[in-house]
Each structure stands twice: as C-alpha cells, then as structure tokens.
Amino acid sequence: MKLILDRAKLNSDLVQSIKDISLQKIMACYQCGKCTAGCPLADAMDIVPNEMMRLVMLGEIDKLLSSKAIWLCTSCFQCGTRCPKGIEVHRVFEALRCLALRDGKNYTDMEKLPDEKLEEIPQQGIIAGFRKFESLE
Amino acid sequence: MEIYPYFPGCALSTKAKALDICARESMKALGIELKELEDWTCCGAVFPLAEDEHIRLVSPARSFYKAIKYSDRLVTLCSACFNVLRRSLKVLKENAARRERVINYMEEEALEPFPEQLKIHHFIELIRDVIGFENLSTKITKPLQGLKIAPFYDCLTFRPPKEMEFEDSENPRIFSNYITALGGIPVDFPYRSECCGAHLSVSNPDVSLECSYRIIKSAQLAGAEALLTSCPLCHYNLDFRQKEMAEKNIDFKPIPVFYLTQILGIALGLPKEVLGFEKNYVSPLSLLEGKGLI
C-alpha cells in the first residue's frame, strides 16, 4: 500500500470526529499487534485492527470507511481488553462505523433479510446486524 | 420466599424461552421468586459505544427507574441485556453530563433522583452470592454425574472487564464452578471465550459460521459432550447453525448446547416441559438418557 503523508489529512475533521466519538488516545498506540492477535475476525478482514489504528493516526480515514473490516467487527471487545496501552480499539471501530452510517452509507435493507432468518435469529443479533451492515450475501 | 425484580428481555420472551422458564422455575425451587419487571422495555440490545449517542441510554434508564421501586437490585440473564444494562448504569452513575441529557429526554418519567444505589445482577451472580455454589450442591436432586460440559464464556457477559466488573475475562471460572456445583464435569477448552460470530449471521453468515465451527471443534477435541451458554445469540450460532456445519463438513458430529439454566433445571429434577429441549436444535435427550438424567 502506497501512502503519501499529508499534514492536512493528519489533522482533518474526520480524524477529530473519530477522537470525539471514541474518546480514545489514538496516538498512544505503539503497534504491538495484540489487538489483531486476539481478534476472532482478523483472518476475514482486509484491514486488521492494528493497521486500522495506524491508518487513523495517519489520517487515512477514507481507506477505512471503504473497508470491509469495519463491518466485520462484531464488537466482542477482545482488542480493547488486551491492549497494553488501554486503548479501547472497539470504540475506534465504532467511531468509523458511525462516520459511515451518519454519511448515509451502508444502510440496511430490511426487506432483503429472509423471513426464516427473521424468525430464527434472536433480536439482539438482528438489531446489531442492522447497525453494522455491508451487504447481505 | 425472597423476591427480586427480573428483566427477561425480548429474546427470552420469544426465541429463548427455555432459558427464561428454567430460570424462573429453578429459582422457585430454590426459594427465590424472579418477579418480571412491570412494563419493561427493550434494553436496546447493543450498548452505544459512541460517546455522543445519548438517546440509546434512555431505554435502560427507564428500566432503572422502574426497578428501584421494588428493590436495589435488578436481575437479568440474557447476555445482551446484562451487558447493556450494567454498562448503561455505570455510565449514568459516573458521567453527570450524560446523565443530565438522558434525564432531559425522559421528562416526567424521571422526576425522582437517579437510582444510583441500583445494582444489575446476572442470574449466575444471584446463585453465587445469594444461594452459594456449595449450598446449591446440597439442594440438587439429580447431580449431573459423568456429564462433561464445556462452558462457553460469551463476550457480552464478561467483556469489557473494566465496565462489566464481573469475572476475569481472560480466565473466567464462574461457569465451571457452577457445573461442578451441579455435579457435572467442566471441560476447559482453548476457544472458550472466542466470539461466536455474533450478528454476522445476518450479514456475513459464512464468516460467522467459521467462528462458531472453530468453537464447537475446540470443545469436542477437549472431550466435551455438551456446551453451555447464557447468550441467546451464541446459542443460535452454536446450536442451530450446526445444521450448516454438518452440511459443510462430512465428519461433523453434532453436540448439544445447553442454556445456562437448563442444566440447573435438570439437576433440580424439573419436569421435561419446563426444560424446553424441543427448542434445542441438537436434542440433548439421548445424551441425558444415556447418563440416566431424565
């Protein structure tokens, strides 16, 4: 991945929004990778949690907003639990999802969910699924 | 009989009824009444991780105001409800600015001072702290002798540890101790606190199936005959989706997944219609009959 560092990007409104929504000290991350090591979905992600933290630091928010990874995060809180710097990485993921959802991207089409799934899956799964959609396969 | 206000939640009132009914009936047998909170509303299902989403704390707050009229503890069992209620209460207790905003939304529902003395209890905490595991083992009539159960420690009940203030999420013991108290054999396994794939069953079912399959396999390799969970969504992923696991893996052997309260019901000798096994996709009947437990 080729990145051109840009001061404007580093201090952009998007980076500030992520800090405001997540309340996390992004710059405290020293890339140890424990979040990724513990993430049960890392093998399915295009950008793994520690890479995500690094990209937020560098202001590359657009790359993250178009990633699959933010929608594959299940908020199991393992990353934040294991972070030696106390960063709640799951809150940074949520902040990225918020930016996408609030921009009108990736809204769920409830009509696409088959009736039998609606019958079977417990409510908590359906509600959580509706908030974090990429696409129905 | 001691009475505790009880928050069943949506899933336990519909899709996970066995979890609910076994909880109420077992507790009744142990001298405690779980009294359903009048007019409870959905907890919101997902705790708002975004610092600026205040409205989603209103629904839990509403239940706090209702519960405090009866007791300073509110008992719940569903993992999602427990996670949302406990974390919301903590936020509202500790963050005055957010509390004020939420109270402003509630108008006449929140005329009294915020119920700071309220505590959210998980069903298993009630057993550990009020009944006691040692005491419990003297009250059961059918010890789960020889039954090897792998306790699955779901994400929502135990994490994030700083907010849940419950068991050590990296090395939880509580379900193992509970199984031991019921006379069964707890089986530790490497994937005991991995995510089951959760809501990805809605949007990315293949990805979530892989997560659940890893957990089942890990428990089987450790020698488990059954799994145990307190989360309705984990139960769906681990039990119901074994149908797809069997279709995709020719050597797959189904394994029953008990709800947390079903094994208590068995050990207390509750009747079959209370235990609700017809809702378990993989029926535990032949396993239990083999052990002489039903």
Image (tube, rainbow, N blue to C red):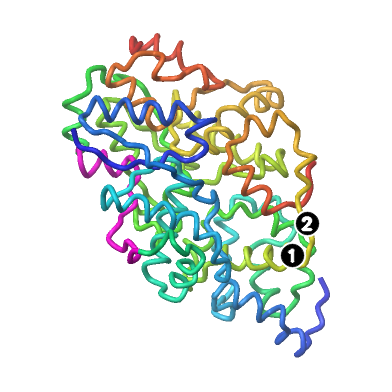
Q: Looking at the image, which residue is at 49% across and 54% down?
A: B59
Residue at mark 1? A100
Q: Is residue B22 magenta?
A: no
Same chain for labels 1 and 2? Say yes or no: yes
Q: Is residue B128 magenta?
A: yes
Q: Position of residue B162 (x, y in %)?
A: 39, 63
Q: Are marks 1 and 2 in contact (CB under 8 Å)?
A: yes
Please report, as a chain letter, where disc 1 is located: A
Q: Is residue B88 above or below residue B229?
A: below
Please report, as a chain letter, where disc 2 is located: A
Considering depth in this image, is B244 or B76 the residue closer to the camera? B76
Q: Position of residue B228 (x, y in %)?
A: 43, 32
Q: Earlier along the polypeptide chain: callout 1 or callout 2?
A: 1
Q: Is residue A93 above or below residue B267?
A: below
Q: Residues within 10 Å of mark 2 (few under 14, many from 20)?
A: some
Q: Looking at the image, which residue is at 50% across and 42% down?
A: B191
Magenta segment boundaries in residue numbering: B112-131
Give left or right: position of A2 versus B170. right
Quarter assignment of residue B251: top right
Q: Secondary structure at mark 1?
A: helix
Considering depth in this image, is B30 or B268 the residue closer to the camera? B30
Q: Is residue A129 above or below residue A122?
A: below
The amino acid on which the numbered mark 1 sits, given as a three-letter code, is Ala
Q: Which mark is residue A106?
A: 2
For the N terminus of chain B, the image quarter is top left
Q: Looking at the image, which residue is at 61% across and 52% down?
A: A74
Alpha carbon separation for disc pair 1 and 2: 7 Å
Count of numbered circles on the image: 2
Q: Residues within 10 Å of mark 1 (few under 14, many from 20)?
A: some
The amino acid on which the numbered mark 2 sits, given as a three-letter code, is Asn
